[in-house]
Structure formats: structure tokens, C-alpha cells
Amino acid sequence: MSLIGSRHRALQRGATRRRQPSRRRPGGFDRWLDRAVDIAVVTALVVGGIALALQLLL
């Protein structure tokens, strides 16, 4: 008797299938806010890198 796939079958008990809970997709505002945070972080890293380079060189 093969044990391959027995783990998957052990999780399925009962006659009815249950739906997986749907994940909420980020809406327009969330996507816009994520983009704004990304831009702010990249800008801060670039400005900090330039400031560090100028401090070390001058």
C-alpha cells in the first residue's frame, strides 16, 4: 500500500467542500499609498546617500 498522497486525503473529511476565505485585494487608495511610500523611501535613500558621499568627500 502506497502512502503517496495520503496526507492530502487525510485533510479532506466530510461530504461538503469549504470555500477558502477570499483575500481582500488592495483598492485604489491602498495601491496609491503604497506607491507614495515607495517613492518617499527611495527619495530618502538617494538624498541620504548623496549627503553621506558629500560629507566624506568634503
Image (spheres, rainbow, N blue to C red):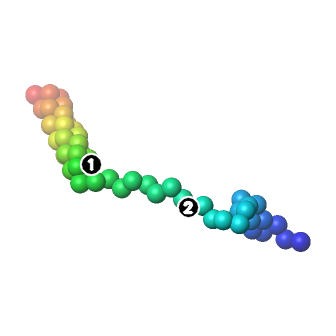
Residue 36 seen anywhere in this rendered image of the structure: yes
Residue 7: x and y in percent read 75, 61
Q: Considering the numbered disc 1 on the image, is that residue within a helix, a strand or a loop?
A: helix
Question: What residue would you read off at disc 2?
Answer: 19
Instruction: Using the image, determine if residue 15 lies above or below residue 38.
Output: below
Q: Residue furthest right?
A: 1
Q: Considering the numbered disc 2 on the image, is that residue within a helix, a strand or a loop?
A: loop
Residue 32: x and y in percent read 21, 50
Q: In which quarter of the image is residue 42?
A: top left
Question: What residue would you read off at disc 1?
Answer: 30
Residue 56: x and y in percent read 17, 29
> In the depicted view, which residue is nearer to us: 21 or 44?
21
Residue 47: x and y in percent read 15, 37
Amino acid at dot 2: Arg
Instruction: Using the image, determine if residue 12 lies above or below residue 51.
Output: below
Residue shown at the point (74%, 65%) measured from the top left = 9
